[in-house]
Image (cartoon, grey):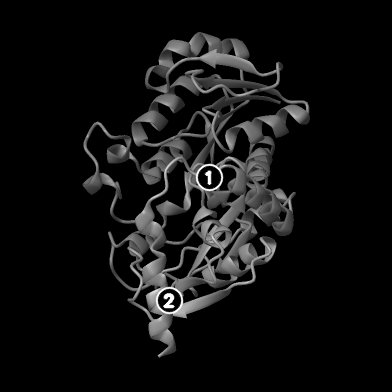
Amino acid sequence: MKVLVIGGTRFIGPIVISQLVSQGHEVAVFNRNQTKVDFSNKVVQITGDRNDIEASIEEFKKFSPEVVLDMIPFNKEEARRTVAVFEGIAERIVAISSADVYLSYGRLIGTEPGESVETPLLETSPLREKLYPYREQAQPEDWRYHYDKIPVEKVYLSSEKIAGTVLRLPMVYGPGDRQHRLFPYLKRINDHRPYILLDEGYAKWKTTRGYVENVAHAIVLAILNPAASNEIYNVSDYNSPEQEWVQLIGEHSGWRGSLEIIEAGKISLGMNINQSINMSSEKIRLELGYTEIVSLEEALKRTIEWENSHPPDSISEKDFDYDMEDRLVKEKSL
């Protein structure tokens, strides 16, 4: 199969491309070619800007992809122009979306208060009613001002000339994670803290996680399977309470400390922890045969090794206020 990838240079994309190439598929990437990635010499580079995607149409026609993978569709206009360019060239577009389309996310961040939404989330669970969740914190020139995956999904699933597939991704972790999702816990472990504190509500809170190679595998399955046309799939490996997640990180780090559950309200969280956002991945497992290619144990091992050798460039001291943590533990014991 011939696959064209829009973006593909950051965290998940190179692994998707590697998996496709290793299976014998022809791959081209379309991006500004500013982030150097050691792709196979079999990968075709089409250099351009998606804000001027029409300028590269002749190169797209020359490559003639069967499927286009859009790794970075941030807003409706980007999706609309992409559909317009590839109608008549490709058979299908696979678009990367997010769990933040669900109403539960609006409940979590406080933009849409109300009763908690039932989880695990299905592909048919209610979506956010308030669009552009980050607009209040951004200026018009900021990409977050126009960011919303809900209109993106609608564009990709509504074309009469080209099929669409939408994948709603979880919190993705693994080597190369620029958000360093495990770092806050690993720093405390590496600093030999005797305990890690969790708010009592946050300890029970659930999110959805996916190891980067497993998520890439799910994307590849959606690309290669025509049955995924005009379908939406949640992608998820592991749904667990935060307390269980931290315990696993500790076990795989050889940590001998303890978890201290702190009374609600003592630790500032900045989110509504009464609303979990864990997703069901039953649909993609049943319809596309998805299963993890890397075990949870191996995923944690690889991620912990990478995180410990690649700390963030900047670390905020206020996020690691050990004096405050010691005080809370002391108060708890009184």
Q: Amino acid at mark 1?
A: Pro
Q: What amino acid is at disc 2?
A: Gly
Of mark 2 and mark 1, the one earlier in the sequence is: 2
Residue 8 sits in quarter? top right
Residue 65 visible to the viewer:
yes
Disc 2 crowd, CA 10 A, few/some/many (<14, 14-19, 20+): some
For label 1, the crowd category at 10 Å Cα-Cα, with few meaning under 14, some 14 to 19 and many 20 or more, is some
Residue 172 screen position, x and y as percent:
56, 49
The image position of residue 92, as x and y in percent, is 57, 31
Residue at 57% across, 75% down: 258
**Residue at label 1?**
311
At 49% from the left and 19% from the top, the residue drawn is: 34
Q: Which quadrant would the C terminus be assigned to in this image?
A: bottom left
Residue 111, quarter of picture = bottom left
Quote the CA–CA distance across marks 2 and 1. Answer: 28 Å
Mark seen at residue 201: 2
- Pick the front one: 15 or 267: 267
Quadrant position of the N terminus in the picture: top right
Relative to 332, residue 321 above or below = above
Question: How many numbered marks does the figure carry?
Answer: 2
Closer to the camera in the image, 231 or 37: 37
Q: Depth check: 314 or 265 in front? A: 314
What residue is drawn where x is 65% and y is 35%? 15
Find the residue positioned furthest to the bottom. Answer: 334
Q: Secondary structure at mark 2?
A: loop
